[in-house]
Amino acid sequence: MRVLGPLEVRANGAPLALGTRKQQTVLAMLAVQAGRVVGLEELIDELWPADPPASAVPNARTYAANLRRLFDASEPTRGLIRRQGDGYMLCADRPAVDLDAFLDDCQAARDLRAAAEPAKAATLLAGALARWRGPMLAGVTQGSVLAARSAALEEERLVATEDLAAIHLELGQPADAARLMRDHTHMYPLRERAYGLLMQARVAVGDVAGALSAYAAARRALGEELGIEPGPELRRLHQAALRPAAEPVPVASTVAPAPVPRWLPRRVADFTGRADLVARLLRAGREAGDDPVIQVIDGMAGSGKTTLAVHVAHHLAEHYPDAQLFTDLQGHGEGSPVEPAAALGTLLRQLGVPAERIPADVHDRIALWRNELAQRRAVVVLDNAASTDQVTPLLPTAPASVVLVTSRRRLAALEGGHPESLPLLSPAEAIDLLANLVGAERVRAEPEAAGQVAARCGYLPLAIRLAGARLAHRPGWRLADLADRLGHHAAVLAELTAENRSIASAFGLSYAPLREPAKRLFRLLGLWPGEHFPVEAAAALSGLTLPEAALVVGELVDCHLVEEPDAGRFRLHDLMSEYARALALSVDPQAEREAAVRGLLDHYLHSVAAVTEPLEPAALRRHLALSQPLRPDLLGAQGPLDNDWLERENANVRALVRHAEQAGHEGYAWRLARAPWRFHYLRGYIGDIVELHECGLRAAERLNDDTAIASMHNYLASGYQRIGRSQEAVLHLEIAIRLRERTGDVGGAGQSRANAASVYWVLGRFEEAASINQKSLAESWRLGERSVLLILPNLGIPLMYLGRLEEALRAHRWHLFLARQSGDHYHLAQGLGHIGAVRVRMGHPHGAIRVIKASLALKKRIGIRLGVAESLNDLACAHQRLGLLSEAERLHRLALTESAAVGHRTIDVATLNDLGVTLALAGRPQASIETHEQALALATRIANPYEQGRALAGIAARRADDDPAEARRHWERALVLFRQMNVPERHEAARRLAALVPADPT
């Protein structure tokens, strides 16, 4: 398991597919705390640091359970993730996790060094550092705990690197130490120890000038960044380097030089982060060519544009020693932007040009300004620019200057400018800034609360500074107190104030200059409940045409009020969204807000229905009973409404259902829950089915609409069945049947009865399931061919379990025939798969393999993920019958991985039992027993008596030779279950039980 870089788990030499980003976050939490129980609350805080959803607990458990299944599907990782009480633990040996191995190697190297074995210590440290493949947990979403752990491990890496250099010096290898520390000090210019080691190494190789240069670089970095002089050790090394190369001090000139114009504002002492961007800007400034360097820094309000520009300008001052100028162009303020002529007058006066020499005509001022700059190496900061037209007259033409422009707008038309859009701080940078503001001790004492404060400030520098200012002036507050206050969305903007500065006022300066259509859309976007949104959503909210909405959204993006993280996908920063929502609540009448949300919900409902209606045409139309769309012009306007579209918008659909239910749009809530059901079912998004239909059920019950309530109960049951909550599924279906019978929905009641029958066979009630489906089949002919298609597979499956294989095969062949007649690819794939499963049981593995492979290919082509695991396991069983046990085991394990990804517990347990049989045939009895024991535990948990019986029989068969008494006990339990279900396995169980030596009566 590797966390020192991108998260990776390798088993048998191959990487495991670790699932979604949140699932990876859960694994990272377990990995960095291996051997320790990580509580459920800790996981939830890390996954949702700002606002955990209502489903946080089941979602977190689902991620953990998925990881357990994923690990248990592979021999090397089986059993490594365990549930302990209310939490989970990674039970891996320390060398198995590269983080622990790194820390152990570092400690061992220190011990070797203390024992006077530096050569061995150097080898061990070099190996430990080689474990790093990049930033810790790169690509994993990190909350406060992971960010703090990453920062701590990064410090450990830096110390280890410096320790290695020190050992190189001890071993008489100064060149190696110099090479190591040269790169180290370049990347981390504030580490005094590293500079000391570099100076010692350079003196040792005779490069005294290089040592003095290193000291000068250290002094400059410490002075500019921290405002301090080098420490005693560094000064001692400096004096030692001077002694062998002392030179006479030159006599100072008696002529005083002209004063250098220095108009840069004071830089902040606690500047934090932005290392890559600062390095890029400095490199561009120091490597100027034949043209002036013009860097444009744009970003949202509060992102730290001015702070960054001033910081970089101070660093460039030594390369541009003739002038350092600064002017605020007031592009976003309470007054009007500064005119170019006035800005030129200010800049010329800063250069020392007498007022009487500054011409009145703006063109003459431009010429004088450019002529003055051509004679100097100058750095100029043009802060808070309003537009390209304002900035262009202020730009130099000679190559001797660098200009840093900051703006809240993207100055796309500015010729010669190199744009840099300022991102948010990373979590680690945000925590570092908070520590600088409130004290490192307070942050170290409450690292999780510090991470929460940073997250709730949206990693926006101004927000963090304002939050830090409140905390710094309230020594009685804990970081947890502030995190709690910021956790209430309604109050977060009010909390982020200090004297006359606030986040709301900063945002207001960006909002005020907008045109009215842009202002209105910005406010309405505060009502958007999802994450990323497309232009169509903006049009549906606002009533604008699609081209109008695209133009206005583009204007908001240019003003950094809206972000565009991916082409055509937009979002509001969390704080910006709160600001927009507050504006909407205060400016827009309630009727207009409700109409906007209704337009949005209507657009998404009709769009989702357009995708899923071909999957269940009659049923979906009947259930939703949709009126005409409010905005037909938007449907499919930006591309086809297909499964790919719904995959992109799935998170938004979930958010819209939750919002509709909470905001009083109950009709849209339950319909939007129902509309994507078939898509979710086929893709294996069972958690979405449960979450959305629980929301939809609450909405339908508030409407007191029996038809809607019945629909929600019916489809909620499908989710419960798949996640192993079969008894609850039956209860929901019984309610749906009663309601549909009461409302006269004969077809719907029949459908729910057929669905109940499919749950019955999971519960081992095979004869009852077959009987219900046989009755339903007779009724379904009157309702049409579509109803027959739904009934036939549910009839064939219990018949197969009852051993009535010829009848089961007829039902599935009939199902396949009707699917071909109707051109229904879903039912074609299912029919082929079910025929293959029956043929395996009939002892025809060759024929089974052909049809199962055809089923698999079709399922993968049309995206039926839920059925892939089942077909892989059936294919494994066919290979098992042919004695191809290695291939069978490989397919079983593939099925387990696929099943774990979609949370299909019934297939999980069946596959485990079939794998147990394969392992036994392969001569691995202990592995077989362990696999059956896993199956028994899972089957018991999900109340699946058939698979319980199979697991007991599998254990009994393996125990027969070494522990007959234990085998008898298991056979007896299996026989009771098999007889209750009347399945053919009862005969083999009775025979094996009779063959056992009778138990000793004593």
Image (spheres, grey):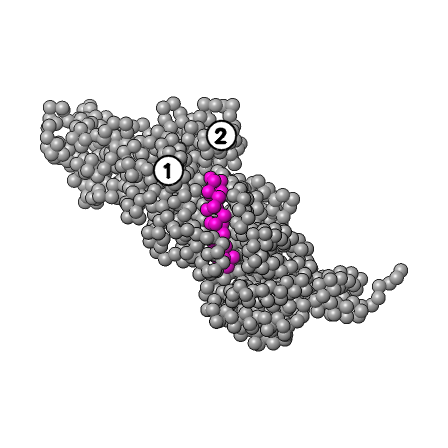
Image-quadrant location for residue 344: top left
Q: Is residue 739 visible?
A: yes
Percent of width and height locating residue 573: 39, 39
- Give yes or no for residue 28 being in the magenta stretch: no
Q: Secondary structure at mark 2?
A: helix
Percent of width and height locating residue 430: 43, 36
Residue closer to the observer: 357 or 128: 357
> How many other residues sit within 10 Å of disc 2, few (<14), some (14-19) or many (≥20)?
some
The span shown in magenta is: 657-682
Q: Main secondary structure of the magenta part?
A: helix
Query: Mark 2 and mark 1 in contact (Cβ < 8 Å)?
Result: no
Q: Secondary structure at mark 1?
A: helix
Percent of width and height locating residue 29: 54, 45
Q: Residue at x 22, y 43 (%)?
A: 413
Q: Is residue 472 above or below residue 535?
A: above
Image position of 186 (left or right of 728): left
Amino acid type shown at disc 2: Arg
- The quarter of the image holding the C terminus is bottom right
> How many other residues sit within 10 Å of disc 1, few (<14), some (14-19) or many (≥20)?
few
Q: Residue at x 64, y 46 (%)?
A: 84
Disc sitting over residue 30 in the figure? none
Disc sitting over residue 592 in the figure? 1
Q: Residue at x 58, y 59 (%)?
A: 750
Q: Residue at x 53, y 60 (%)?
A: 866
Q: Is residue 344 visible?
A: no
Q: Which is closer to the viewer, label 1 or label 2?
A: 1
Percent of width and height locating residue 266: 31, 27
- Which residue corresponds to mark 2? 485
- Give yes or no for residue 666 being in the magenta stretch: yes
